[in-house]
Image (cartoon, grey):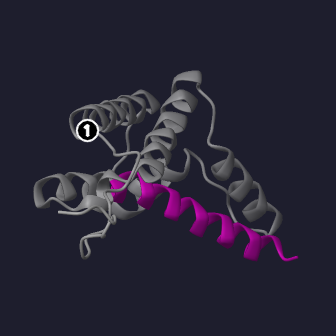
């Protein structure tokens, strides 16, 4: 398969991952204020926490995101230039003309992860959904 197409698919996957992390936190906070029950969904909240946790651990270890490395290598194979600083840093530079040292991104990711953990603790997810509303069930007992 064409390495450029594969790189684009990985880039889309990477963007969706970022959307899960950043957009997920925004929706969870909105759901807290607006009382959206779905934002307490346990699998969603655990996946969200795990996603930012993975990012932060990678940053602390000084490792490049595997999606960034894979996409960058495929772009090089397709004859394009790969990322110089990493997925987030590259796009921030392109979109916002902003450049920062790696430690700054590590700090931002860590602070964001702390906010996710605080939200997880203060606005706890629910393991079981509440029973669906409906008509009362006749249990056969005499009244």
Q: Tell me which corner region of the image, top left, top right, bottom left or bottom right, holds residue 120.
A: top left
* Label 1 element class: helix
The x, y position of residue 116, in whole percent, is: 32, 38
Q: Main secondary structure of the magenta part?
A: helix
Indicate the quadrant containing the N terminus: top left, top right, bottom left or bottom right. Answer: bottom right
Work out which residue is located at the far left of the displayed protein and give it: 33
In the rendered structure, which segment of residues is drawn in magenta? 1-24
The x, y position of residue 59, in whole percent, is: 52, 30
Above or below residue 143? Residue 48 is: above
* 83, 27: nearer the viewer: 27
Say which residue appears at 25% left-offset and 38% top-offset: 119
Residue 54 visible in the current orientation? yes
Q: Is 74 on the left or on the right of 30, as rendered?
A: right
Say which residue appears at 57% left-offset and 59% top-offset: 14
Indicate the quadrant containing the C terminus: top left, top right, bottom left or bottom right. Answer: bottom left
Above or below residue 58? Residue 83 is: below
The x, y position of residue 103, in whole percent, is: 42, 27
Say which residue appears at 68% left-offset and 45% top-offset: 66
Judge whether residue 4 is colored magenta.
yes
Work out which residue is located at the far top of the displayed protein and give it: 61
Judge whether residue 78 is colored magenta.
no
The x, y position of residue 77, in whole percent, is: 83, 63
Say which residue appears at 21% left-offset and 51% top-offset: 29
Mark 1 burial class by Cα count in 10 Å: few <14, some 14-19, many 20+: some
Q: Read off the residue under disc 1.
A: 119
């Amino acid at each position: 398969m064409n390495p450029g197409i594969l790189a684009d698919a990985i880039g889309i996957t990477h963007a969706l991952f970022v959307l899960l992390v950043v957009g997920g936190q925004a929706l969870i906070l909105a759901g807290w204020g607006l009382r959206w029950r779905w934002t307490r969904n346990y699998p969603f909240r655990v996946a969200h926490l795990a996603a930012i946790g993975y990012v932060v651990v990678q940053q602390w270890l000084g490792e490049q995101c595997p999606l960034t490395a894979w996409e960058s290598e495929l772009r090089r194979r397709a004859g394009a230039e790969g990322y110089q600083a990493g997925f987030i840093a590259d796009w921030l530079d392109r979109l916002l003309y902003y450049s920062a040292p790696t430690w700054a991104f590590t700090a931002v990711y860590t602070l964001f992860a702390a906010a996710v953990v605080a939200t997880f603790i203060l606005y706890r997810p629910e393991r079981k959904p509440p029973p669906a509303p409906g008509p009362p069930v006749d249990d056969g007992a005499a009244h």
